[in-house]
Amino acid sequence: MFIPVILGTAREGRRSENPAKYMVEEVKSFGAESELVDVRDYLIGRTDASGETPQAKKFIEILKRSDALIIVVPEYNHGYPGELKIMLDMAYNEYAGKPIGICGVSVGPFGGMRVVEQLRQVVIEYSMIPIREAVYFGNVGKLFDDSGTITDASYHERAQKFIANLKSSLK
Ligand SMILES: Cc1cc2nc3c(=O)[nH]c(=O)nc-3n(C[C@H](O)[C@H](O)[C@H](O)COP(=O)(O)O)c2cc1C
């Protein structure tokens, strides 16, 4: 089982990198394969849904190999980063029928609750199957220490349940 983790912001100084790397390790500890898919490696500047750019080809190959997806996304003015949407719109058919879990990130206590809800609406249009559960990385500035290690051990159980739910949504 291959579950890549998309890191949904290219912002300089982004804090979402720690939660995204954490989720890659959680997928591996669940017993599945994973890798980080960093939106920074897929920047094309404007929407191009042709599937013909080198970035799109690379992304589509990852999607074809994947059984399910995880997106780790920060909340920007209650929405998702534009670069994430441009990246996701580079593909379409390859998403169909795949389960997806969304993790929100914010410096505040709500952990990107609103962006998780918004992104669910988008992934339904790709014919993906969003799971009900989410992992919310609230207070992200304090949640990881300087070495990028999570400081709240309870996230492990939460993340494992989330991944188990993703797996149980597989056809
Ligand atoms: C343009 C912008 C808009 C933001 N809007 C929100 C917001 O609506 N709600 C929120 O909780 N945090 C908001 N934040 C703060 C993020 O929660 C914070 O940057 C956090 O570290 C996650 O994003 P990062 O991966 O870019 O660091 C915003 C940050 C930026 C850069």
Image (spheres, rainbow, N blue to C red):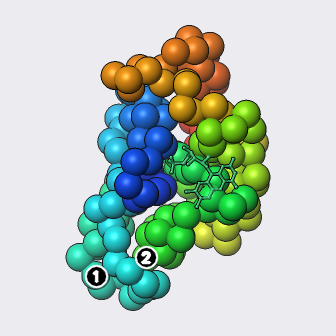
Q: Is residue 21 above or below residue 40?
A: above
Q: Residue 22: which disc? A: none
* Residue closest to the far top: 153
Write down the residue under mark 1.
Answer: 53
At x 34%, y 71%, the residue is 43
| Residue 25 visible in image | yes
Q: Residue at x 76, y 52 (%)?
A: 114
Q: Dividing the picture into quarters, in which one does residue 87 lie?
A: bottom left
> In this rendering, is residue 145 above or below 49?
above
Q: Amino acid at mark 1?
A: Thr
Circle 2 sits in a helix, a strand or a loop, which is it? loop
Q: 77 left or right of 157?
A: right
Give the camera-side residue of 45 and 158: 45
Counting from the top left corner in percent of width and height, residue 137 is at: 61, 34
**Contact flag, marks 2 and 1 (Cβ < 8 Å):** yes
Q: Which quadrant of the view contains residue 21?
A: top left
Q: Is residue 2 visible?
A: no
The residue drawn where x is 54% and y is 32% is 141
* Marks 2 and 1, the one that precedes in the sequence: 1
How far is mark 2 from mark 1, CA to CA?
9 Å
Q: How many numbered circles are shown?
A: 2
Q: Nearer the viewer, residue 22 or 79?
A: 79
Q: Amino acid at mark 2?
A: Met
Residue at disc 1, secondary structure: loop
Q: Which residue is mark 2?
A: 90
